[in-house]
Amino acid sequence: MLTKWLHKVLPRKSARRGKRREISLAQHHIQADDLSFAAEKVITRLQKEGYQAYVVGGAVRDLLLGVTPKDFDVATDATPEQIHKLFRRSRIIGRRFPIVHVMVGPETIEVTTFRGGAVNSHNELGRIMKDVSFGTLEQDAMRRDFTANALYYDPKQQVVLDFHHGVEDILNRRLVMIGNPAERYQEDPVRMLRAARLSGKLGFTVDKHTSKPIAECAQLLKREPPARLFDEVLKILFSGYAQACLRQMNNLGLKDIHPLLDALMPGGESNDNIVALALHNTDERLRADKSVSMGFVLAAVLWPHIRTVWQRELNSGMRSSAAMNAAITSERQHVDKNWGVPQRYSVTMREIWSLQPQFEIMRGARPYRLLGQPRFRAAFDFMCLRASLGELSQDTVQWWQAFQHGSDVEREQLIRTASQSEKNSTRQKRYRNRRTNKPKQEEA
Ligand code: ATP
Ligand code: MG
């Protein structure tokens, strides 16, 4: 209904891009109290001091779509130093693009100064290396990536400013790059990943001029610092729509960019059921507002490799835990060097792996020790994931389930039962071995 009506009141697409249009409350329906307390406070303060200040980007887009924004960004004509002076709890960050983080209660608002038309420094491939030129609101809108992200909301005037037909593109669920898409990808290759992420997450189609140069420019992403790519991978994984984003990456020809992305891709070489299952669980948990551990997701993504090396070492006669340590060591150097994974995640990932062999031991004091490990919960969930794919028996899952929640007496009983069935199976094995060896001896 609203969509139909907005289509009617908005000017036709033929209007020149870059021209400022004001969308009124009657058209956009965003209420000032749709903003977070912190966003409202930051904007009010800046405006009170005589600066221009708007909510910009994803938050305006999401509010127009009727989605609750996950964070609020603010754009202003105040310089980073001026912003920093106004807010006691703030800090200037970013080398390439200085921005200010303003903390209000538990929230952090990212405040950026309007970017100017001139980029200070490009490399030989046209990539922006440094950008500290400040400019007008119109220039800032030109420098944003997609039309849907170049919308500015002023809560005081209750107006949305639209320079590039962003509102119309949102209504048509279309992602359109501002300016010449190939040049914009050369300036900043991460915009290609953003195209995949935003279209996957929002269910938008990517405009054909916007998608066309991507396959050709995709290799530029390889030159990006692994840590920046990893940041974007995190956003994909935590979007709640990881599977859809990865499908979009595939459709757009974004392949062979980062080992982690390759491992995640549907049908990718190192792809495995456990990766698909972990992504599915992650999406479901995020949509249900539950927490997700990056270390856990990474543990699943790299598991196919770890499992192969672990199995190989086991076959060569190593004990289970030692074989697992060997597998972890083999992966360690490669991941630390090439993946840009921050240590806080890789440490959790390795702890989850190293606890896996211990779930096989259900006798003596070992189960108690495992239960006391700080990462027990994550390791147990990971073991359940493996069991759901047939790597372990459901009996093992049930045993650990009962052990975790049992009383002292019940735990002792569980250990006794497990020890007994282990003895029985060892006896059976010996008996089988003797029987299979017997005829050979007779023949000899
Ligand atoms: P999300 O909902 O994931 O936060 P977002 O569009 O808000 O999506 P942010 O990374 O928060 O993404 O960026 C805020 C805004 O900054 C974007 O909406 C866009 O206007 C601008 N922006 C971010 N990254 C780029 C980029 N690489 N090039 C140009 N503009 C960008
Ligand atoms: Mg945002």
Image: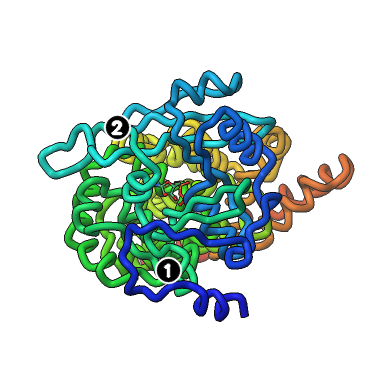
Do labels 2 and 1 touch, CB within 8 Å? no
Identify the image quadrant of residue 129. Answer: top left
Residue found 34% across the figure and 33% down from its top? 134
Mark 2 CB near ligand 1 (8 Å cut): no
Q: Is residue 66 visible?
A: yes
| Residue type indicated by callout 2 | Ser
Residue positioned most to the left: 124
Question: Sequence-wise, which precedes: disc 2 or disc 1?
Answer: 2
Q: Is residue 24 above or below residue 409?
A: below
Residue neighbourhood size for the residue with mark 2, other residues' Cα within 10 Å, grouped as few (<14), some (14–19), many (≥20): some
Residue found 67% across the figure and 55% down from its top? 31
Q: Count every numbered label the image shows and give the total.
A: 2
Residue found 20% across the figure and 63% down from its top? 213
> Callout 2: helix, strand or loop?
loop
Q: Is residue 140 above or below residue 388?
A: above
Image quarter in which the N terminus is found: bottom right
Q: Is residue 431 visible?
A: no
Q: Which residue is mark 2?
A: 133
Q: Is residue 414 left or right of residue 327?
A: right
Q: Position of residue 382 (x, y in %)?
A: 58, 51
Q: Which residue is mark 1?
A: 169
Mark 1 CB near ligand 1 (8 Å cut): no
Residue found 13% across the figure and 44% down from its top? 125
Q: Between residues 204 and 305, which one lies in front from this camera angle?
A: 204
